[in-house]
Image: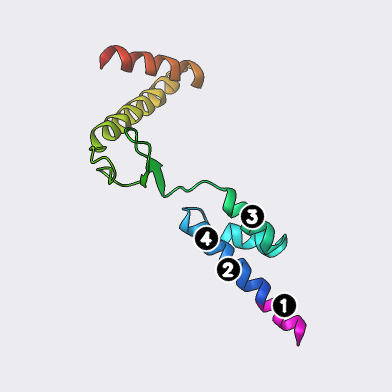
Amino acid sequence: MSSIIGVILWIILCALTATLAERKGHKGIGYFLLALFLSPLIGLIIVACISNKTQKLCPYCKNAIDIHATVCGFCGKELTKKNSTNAEKEKWISERIVELISTGKTATDAKIQAEAEYSVEK
């Protein structure tokens, strides 16, 4: 009887580990399996140490805000303009790297050339 209670408690603690990992933006099933095979205690310690993927730092006031926030809740500054420009830059560079690789350049050379071209064109 006590071994059944131990197994149930083990699985509950593994599920808790997975839930906490999910809340931090990580895959819960991986942490569930980690806790199941190693130990729920080790899983909980690892989850406590991992970064929170659901938050980012505001570039102006350095407070933790939601990753999808467009306005900082602490300082009130708008965040979308810089982020969209950065996303556009990354997209343009990625597309250009693919074009350059298809012409025979190495990935490193293509990346360097694409970044240089972007800085000259924009």
Circle 3: element type:
helix
The mark nearer the N terminus, 4 or 1, is 1
Local SS, label 2: helix
Of the two numbered discs 1 and 2 on the same chain, state the one appearing first in sequence: 1
In the rendered structure, the answer to whether residue 18 lies left or right of residue 122 reads right
Q: Tag 1: Cα neighbours inside 10 Å, few (<14), some, or many (≥20)?
A: few
Q: Residue furthest bottom?
A: 1
Q: Position of residue 14 (x, y in %)?
A: 62, 67
The local secondary structure at tag 4 comes to: helix
Question: Could you tell whether 22 is left or right of 117 in the image?
Answer: right
Which quarter of the rendering shows the C terminus? top left
Quarter occupied by residue 62: top left
Residue bearing mark 2: 15
Q: Is residue 102 above or below residue 120?
A: below
The reply to whether residue 83 is visible in this rendering is: yes
> Percent from the top left, x then y, of residue 36?
68, 65
Q: Residue at x 32, y 18 (%)?
A: 118
The residue carrying mark 4 is 20
Which amino acid type is marked by label 1? Gly
Could you tell me how far apart the alpha carbons at marks 2 and 3 are, in whole angstroms? 14 Å
Mark seen at residue 45: 3
Mark-to-mark CA distance, 1 and 3: 20 Å
Residue 107 highlighted magenta (yes or no)? no
User: Residue at horizontal 41%, vertical 20%?
Assistant: 100
